[in-house]
Amino acid sequence: MTVHFHPTVSPEACPALVLNADFRPLSYYPLSLWSWQDAIKAVFLDRVNIVSNYDKTVRSPSFEMRLPSVVSLKTYIKPSRHPAFTRFNVFLRDRFICQYCGARQDLTFDHVIPRSKGGTTTWENVVAACSTCNLHKGDRLPGEAHMWPARAPYQPTVNDLHHNGRLFPPNYLHESWMDYLYWDSVLEP
């Protein structure tokens, strides 16, 4: 087990990266993180193994423990093959890019075939779009608006979203997490 030193920080600044029993993150974006309280509770309930610790210690009158920085589940959780259809997952599938102009700000979603023209709110008909393009396209079909998505909308797999999530690392990555987040990256020669 590795111990990582952190200068004086509060326990709140010490989340635990949660890995599945196969040591892959449960989710890449957002990362599967537990608060220090949830990580300690899972340790006591014998649901996880501690893989790595922070140098930060928590104490009670009868107990002392280093805060876990990486934990792995003892029981493998089979990932769903098809992720939930949510606004966030649509944005992640489309890499947080407007599918009409390539903008990255002020994203919303657009029905490629408008609902008023029989379009459905499904993976295969919804794309990320900036507000400007969404307003410009309005209630028209792509041919009428002369606006086609850069990529045809599709139902992604969990692996598709994990792959895209790796392109958007969070603002904070503890050094003890790196071996578990990017273990399948292509190595430089």
Image (cartoon, grey):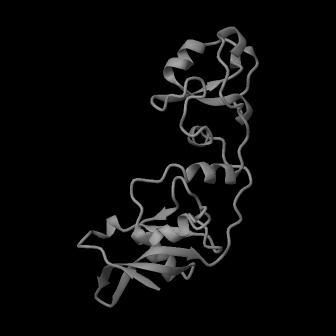
Q: Would residue 166 be found to the left or right of residue 64 on screen? A: right
Q: Is residue 126 above or below residue 167?
A: above
Name the residue at 58% across, 68% down.
183
Camera-side residue: 20 or 38?
Answer: 20
* Residue at 60% over, 14% down: 137
Residue under the point 44% across and 53% down: 170
Q: Residue furthest top?
A: 144
Residue at 62% over, 52% down: 163
Q: Quadrant of residue 185?
A: bottom right
111 lies above or below 79: above
Q: In the displayed orientation, state which residue is furthest to the left.
A: 8
Q: Quadrant of residue 58?
A: bottom left
Q: Position of residue 54 (x, y in %)?
A: 37, 77
- Whole-percent x, y for residue 87 in the image: 58, 37
In this picture, residue 172 sits left or right of residue 183: left
The answer to whether 37 is drawn above or below residue 108 in the figure is below
**Image quadrant for the C terminus?**
bottom right
